Image: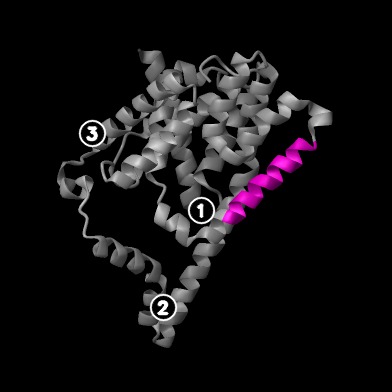
Amino acid sequence: MFDMLLWFAVVMVLFAVGDVVAKLTKARISSVFATLMLFLILFVAGVLPADIIEKAGLSAASSWSVPMLLFAMGSMINLRQFMDEWRTVVTCWFGMLAVIIGVSLTIPIIGKEMALSAIPVVNGALPATQIMTEAATKAGYPLAAALAAITFAVQKFVGTPFASSASLRYAQGLIGEYRKAKSSGTLDEFMAAAGKSENRNSEAKTASKRITLAEKFDGFYSSNVCILLAVVGGLLSVWLGELTHINYAILGLVLGVIFTQLGVVCPRTSSRKPKPAVLSTWWCSLPSFPPWPTSPYPTSST
């Protein structure tokens, strides 16, 4: 018990240090990137054991929390917003198509199995990583499973700084526009333009005059109730996956969307109420990484 809590404390320290770095650098270095770099450096230096996640008791959590996380992610999908932002959606589709074509060109070099395991990970991040590592392992392609996990890790290392920089520049631009509008006396017009989309959604919601179950009993949707809904959603996705042979990750996302649209689940179930950190994306993603530096193969928990 002591050893498990000790290693769990070490993991928490690294996450906390990542948050501090993000705060000190004003998000120029994201907490995710800082934490991942700490893990990588300490793994390679031999300071941390390769199986620290297992020693901290998080390996089992990475299995049962993924269906819950995916259901919660589904509850974040707003179909009305998707229709309003159709240009963004189409741009994402073109980006995914470019990834498929680009990685497919490497088939003569790395092989068909390796390329097929990497394409979904680049496009789908954590959910795709879970799907591909499990599928490749069951199909008898351990190297392809390892490539999927490594692709996810490298994608985070390379992509996170650019994403943080772009988000920071966008936020700074909004702040600049706000200050300019405030100094020029046009703050009301600026705020009205910024809230136009939100007001439109609010008006449409009011026009429908349909009070959902989640809205009617909003006071009963406590942290524990929201977590219970995520557990039930994850359980249903796994059960239906066994019946239909459709991956539970896809079913979890779909069920999250359906139950949210029906009003049974609160939109953004994962963030609307406080929740234990164990449900965070990164608690699920860490065990997906191959153990460093001793083996290129994924662990059995992936």
Residue 302 visible (yes or no): yes
Q: Earlier in the sequence, mark 1 or mark 3?
A: 1
* Label 3 vs 2, first from the N-terminus: 2
Q: Taking 204 as reference, is 176 above or below it?
A: below
Q: Residue 87: where, in percent of width, then height?
A: 56, 60
Q: Is mark 1 in CB contact (under 8 Å) with mark 2? A: no
Question: Which label belongs to residue 27?
Answer: 1
Frontmost of labels 1 and 2 is 2
Q: Circle 3 — which element? A: helix
Q: Main secondary structure of the magenta part?
A: helix
Q: Front-most of 123 and 8?
A: 123
In which quadrant of the rendered image does the N terminus lie?
top left
Kindly identify the residue that appears in the image at 39 percent across and 87 percent down.
185
Residue 259, position as x, y percentages in the image: 32, 40
Residue at the far bottom in the pictured view: 184
- Start-end of magenta stretch: 90-105
Q: Is residue 13 above or below residue 178?
A: above
Identified by mark 2, the residue type is Phe
Checking the image for residue 103, the label placed there is none
Residue flagged by tag 3: what amino acid is it? Asn
Q: 173 or 89: nearer the eye?
A: 89
**In the rendered image, the vertical position of residue 100 relative to residue 246, given as above or below:** below
Nearer the viewer's eye, disc 1 or disc 3? 3
According to the image, label 2 marks what residue? 190
Q: Nearer the viewer, residue 251 or 34?
A: 251
